[in-house]
Image: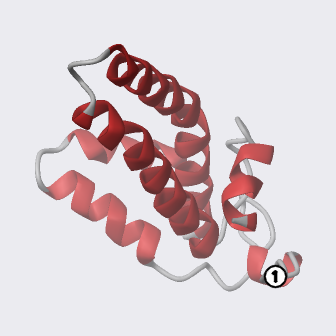
């Protein structure tokens, strides 16, 4: 949860680098929260409560859009790639897969033009 909250603390920070764990924990918790809001909306779509859940779902997705782009860009920076690589997502089939592969790659071990290696610069958050 610490990694998820770290992304929200760096809401629109597109500079610097982010570790794989930060990026993927954000993706995991983001998906879980979206499902928690979407599924009740789907099950209760006939009632007014379903509309409220769908509204909360879309508000959450809009709120998480910028932090998602930011952590994705910082993750690309961590692999020594420009944030402009995000645009590859518009290439059908190949683009999203390529972006996921870039996010799965290990960090550039040394400092690069985007900053120091986050593995050596940041202490690992305590679990629990």
- Closest to the observer, 20 or 80: 20
SS at mark 1 in the image: loop
Q: In this view, does 65 lie to the left or right of 10?
A: left
Task: State the quadrant of the C terminus.
Answer: bottom right
Return the x and y of residue 73 as percentages of the image width and height: 56, 50
Question: Looking at the image, which residue is at 72% across and 61% down?
Answer: 113
**Is 16 displayed left or right of 70 in the figure?**
right
Vertical side of 123 occupied by 55: above or below: above
Return the x and y of residue 50 as percentages of the image width and height.
Answer: 33, 24
Classify residue 18 by image quadrant: bottom right
Rendered residue at 34%/38% (across/down): 40
For the residue pair 102 and 49, the one nearer the viewer reads as: 49
Q: Is residue 124 above or below residue 114?
A: below
Point out residue 4 in the picture as x, y percentages from the top left corner.
66, 58
User: Circle 1 is placed at which residue position?
Assistant: 124
Number of marks in picture: 1
Who's the residue at 53% across and 41% down the image?
A: 69
Residue at figure coordinates x 43%, y 47% from the top left:
36
On the rendered image, what quadrant is the N terminus found in? bottom right
8 displayed left or right of 26? right
| Image quadrant in which you'd find residue 98 | bottom left
Q: How crowded is mark 1: few (under 14 residues within 10 Å), some or many (20 or more)?
A: few
For the residue pair 113 and 94, the one nearer the viewer reads as 94
Q: Can residue 80 be seen in this view?
A: no
Work out whether residue 119 can be spotted.
yes
Q: How is the image coloured?
A: secondary structure
């Amino acid at each position: 949860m610490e990694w998820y909250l770290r992304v929200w603390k760096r809401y629109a920070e597109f500079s610097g680098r982010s570790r794989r764990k930060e990026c993927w924990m954000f993706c995991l918790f983001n998906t879980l929260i979206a499902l928690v809001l979407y599924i009740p909306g789907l099950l209760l779509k006939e009632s007014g409560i379903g509309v409220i859940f769908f509204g909360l779902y879309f508000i959450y997705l809009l709120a998480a859009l910028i932090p998602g782009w930011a952590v994705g860009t910082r993750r690309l920076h961590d692999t020594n790639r420009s944030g402009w690589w995000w645009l590859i997502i518009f290439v059908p089939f190949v683009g999203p897969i390529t972006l996921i592969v870039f996010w799965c790659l290990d960090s550039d071990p040394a400092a690069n033009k985007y900053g120091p290696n986050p593995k050596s610069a940041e202490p690992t958050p305590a679990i629990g």
